[in-house]
């Protein structure tokens, strides 16, 4: 347990370098660097902490961990335990500073009333947790360095954000000076949440489009909004029914080459631990033989969290379109 607390302390110091931020991956057990805790990730979202377990966790362990987190982080009022094994993710327990432990019904969607508004900040930009938080929370802490890359490379650029989710990349792009951003995700409710995130940062919605399209069937419609200077592709790794990484990434990669302006950049992300960095690069390199895109490098993730095997952590690769 002390090993977890020490890592949380170290990560809080590290993220405080980036100004106003109260969201981060506090503990990355899935990286394999902490013996006995490989099944555990811990994320901070403002006043709320989520302990995500990929195996069954005993009530006593969660209760002890929650007390330690609350002692360590005075701003946190609520800790959740979410389990992710079997058919679906489920919230199992909550631990509230003033009420203690509560057993939740794993078969019921949870819409929790926070003491605040469920908001949190990364690099001074404001976001909100999703109202129904039993599945996903509305923000992925592990893509911190990708968001930082977008913030620093978007000035004057036209951006396409594929699998936009709640539009975090879009918000960082506009903050970084992008002239316009096109967000595409087939889930209209998530895009609407993304729109609220934009408004929370007083960003001009005339610069932002929200397209509720099935991406693989809508390439021609998406192309009309281009050409783009940066295309970001961060598909869900756990939803094989909506996007098969091995089969469909190649098709999307080839389509992206035709939508990019000269010298444009394609940011290809993959968070499936079953696919190594080498395998992912091979998938895209094989496709690039028939396109004008060339591999430029990998966005370094080592700042964000510890990984024993960098081959299996988050893959975020940069490809650039050659000038014609």
Image (cartoon, helix red, strand yellow):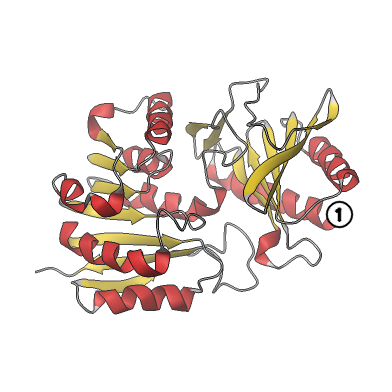
Q: Is residue 103 left or right of 155 when viewed as pictured?
A: right
Question: For this view, does 291 lie left or right of residue 28?
Answer: left
Q: Quadrant of the N terminus?
A: bottom right
Residue located at (40% from left, 57% from top) = 243
Q: Is residue 2 left or right of residue 31?
A: right
Q: Which residue is mark 1?
A: 2
Q: Please tell me which residue is depicted at 23% across the width and 49% down the height of the picture.
A: 218
**Residue 119 is drawn in which quadrant?**
top right
* Residue 142 appears in the rendering: yes
Q: Relative to 158, is 214 on the left or the right?
A: right
Q: Circle 1 — which element? A: helix
Q: Please tell me whether residue 130 is drawn above or below residue 225 in the rendered image.
A: above
- Give the camera-side residue of 156 and 219: 219
From the viewer's side, name the closer residue of 297 and 90. 90
Q: Position of residue 86 (x, y in %)?
A: 67, 54
| Within-10-Å neighbours for mark 1: few <14, some 14–19, many 20+ | few
Judging depth in this view, the residue of 227 and 152 nearest the camera is: 227
Count of number-bearing discs: 1
Relative to 25, say whether 105 is above or below: above
Which residue in the rendered view is the most extreme toward the left? 324
Give the residue at x 71% y 60%. 29
* Image coordinates for residue 185, horizontal then vertical, percent: 35, 43
Q: Residue at x 80, y 35 (%)?
A: 70
Residue 144: % across, % down: 51, 51
Question: As displayed, is residue 260 above or below residue 44?
Answer: below
Q: Position of residue 280 (x, y in %)?
A: 42, 72
């Amino acid at each position: 347990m002390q090993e977890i607390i020490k890592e949380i302390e170290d990560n809080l110091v590290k993220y405080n370098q980036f100004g106003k931020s109260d969201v981060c991956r506090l503990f990355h057990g899935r990286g394999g660097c902490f013996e006995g805790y490989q099944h555990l990730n811990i994320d901070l979202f403002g006043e709320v902490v989520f302990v995500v377990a990929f195996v069954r966790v005993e009530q006593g362990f969660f209760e002890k961990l929650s007390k330690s987190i609350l002692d360590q982080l005075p701003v946190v009022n609520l800790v959740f335990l979410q389990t992710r094994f079997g058919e679906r993710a489920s919230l199992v327990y909550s631990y509230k500073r003033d009420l203690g432990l509560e057993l939740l019904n794993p078969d019921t969607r949870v819409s929790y009333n926070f003491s605040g508004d469920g908001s949190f900040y990364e690099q001074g930009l404001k976001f909100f947790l999703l109202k129904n938080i039993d599945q996903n929370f509305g923000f992925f802490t592990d893509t911190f360095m990708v968001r930082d890359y977008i913030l620093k490379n978007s000035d004057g650029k036209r951006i396409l954000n594929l699998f936009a989710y709640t539009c975090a990349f879009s918000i960082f792009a506009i903050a970084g000076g992008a002239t316009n951003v096109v967000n595409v995700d087939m889930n209209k409710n998530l895009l609407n949440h993304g729109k609220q995130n934009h408004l929370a940062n007083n960003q001009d919605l005339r610069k932002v489009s929200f397209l509720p399209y099935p991406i693989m069937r809508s390439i021609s419609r998406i192309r009309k909004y281009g050409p783009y200077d940066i295309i970001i592709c961060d598909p869900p790794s756990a939803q094989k029914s909506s996007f098969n990484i091995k089969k469909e990434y190649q098709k999307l990669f080839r389509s992206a080459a035709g939508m990019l302006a000269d010298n444009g950049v394609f940011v290809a992300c993959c968070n499936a631990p079953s696919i190594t960095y080498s395998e992912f690069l091979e998938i895209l390199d094989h496709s690039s033989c028939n396109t004008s895109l060339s591999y430029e490098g990998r966005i370094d993730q080592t700042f964000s969290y510890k990984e024993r095997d960098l081959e299996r952590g988050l893959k975020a690769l940069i490809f650039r379109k050659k000038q014609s």
